[in-house]
Image (cartoon, helix red, strand yellow):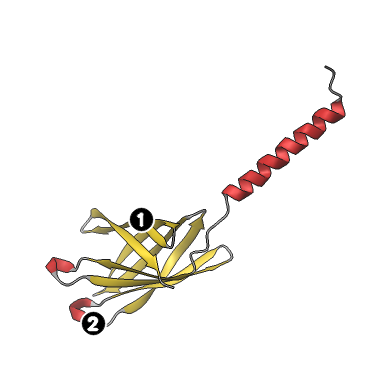
Amino acid sequence: MNISKFTKILLGAVLLTGSLVQAQADDKKVDPTGTYIWTMPGRNGGPDRTNTLVLKLDGDKLTGSVASPGRGGAAPTPVDITDGKVTGSDISFNVVRTFNDNSMTNKYSGTIADGSIKGKIESERNGQPMSRDWNATLQK
């Protein structure tokens, strides 16, 4: 069977176009915009702590804030997220809190699926790495 040069070029172009369309579909970002809530155990056996995350996707930029109950039962204070990123269904961002002239960075990462974000919160305390799970649910 003799395939002409034009047919080979046309077939190659069709295959390449199909690959590009599939690559774009695989790279499609989810939109995490919304308010999420999750509960974590309290410090030293204290009452559970309910956290609120507000996210907004604006183009490629992920912004928002996290509000956690204050120490000693103080009202929650929102803290802006930094370095927010969305890659496919994965998100990541940092939250930097400052108290007593010290700052602590919590690095959040997770995967969005079915109205929730499941992932890890990583930080460092006294030079020791710490990690805990988080599972936030989108509020409707």
Quadrant showing the N terminus: top right
The three-letter code of the residue at mark 2 reads Ala
Asked which quadrant contains residue 119, the reply is bottom left
Quadrant showing the C terminus: bottom left
Percent from the top left, x then y, of residue 128?
A: 22, 53
Task: Give the secondary structure at mark 1.
Answer: strand
First along the sequence among labels 1 and 2 = 2
Percent from the top left, x then y, of residue 123?
A: 29, 58
Percent from the top left, x then y, of residue 13?
A: 77, 37
Q: State the residue position of label 2.
A: 74
Using the numbered discs, state the Cα–Cα distance from disc 1 to disc 2 in whole angstroms: 27 Å
Relative vertical location of residue 15 with respect to residue 30 in this rendering, above or below: above
In the picture, measured across the screen, residue 100 lies left or right of residue 112, that is: left
Q: Count neighbours of disc 1 (C-alpha within 10 A) and say few if under 14, some if 14 to 19, many if 20 or more.
A: some
Task: Give the secondary structure at mark 2.
Answer: loop
Which is more toward the observer, 19 or 71?
19
Which is more toward the observer, 113 or 17?
113
Residue name at image x 37 percent, y 66 percent: 137
Percent from the top left, x then y, of residue 17?
A: 72, 42
Q: Nearer the viewer, mark 1 or mark 2?
A: 1
Label ID, residue 35: none
Q: Count neighbours of disc 2 (C-alpha within 10 A) and say few if under 14, some if 14 to 19, many if 20 or more.
A: few
Residue name at image x 72 percent, y 36 percent: 15
In the picture, measured across the screen, residue 17 lies left or right of residue 9, that is: left
Residue name at image x 52 percent, y 53 percent: 88
In the picture, measured across the screen, residue 72 lies left or right of residue 98, that is: left
Asked which quadrant contains residue 104, the reply is bottom left
Considering every residue shown, the one lying at the far left of the view is: 45
The three-letter code of the residue at mark 1 reads Gly
Q: State the residue position of label 1.
A: 119
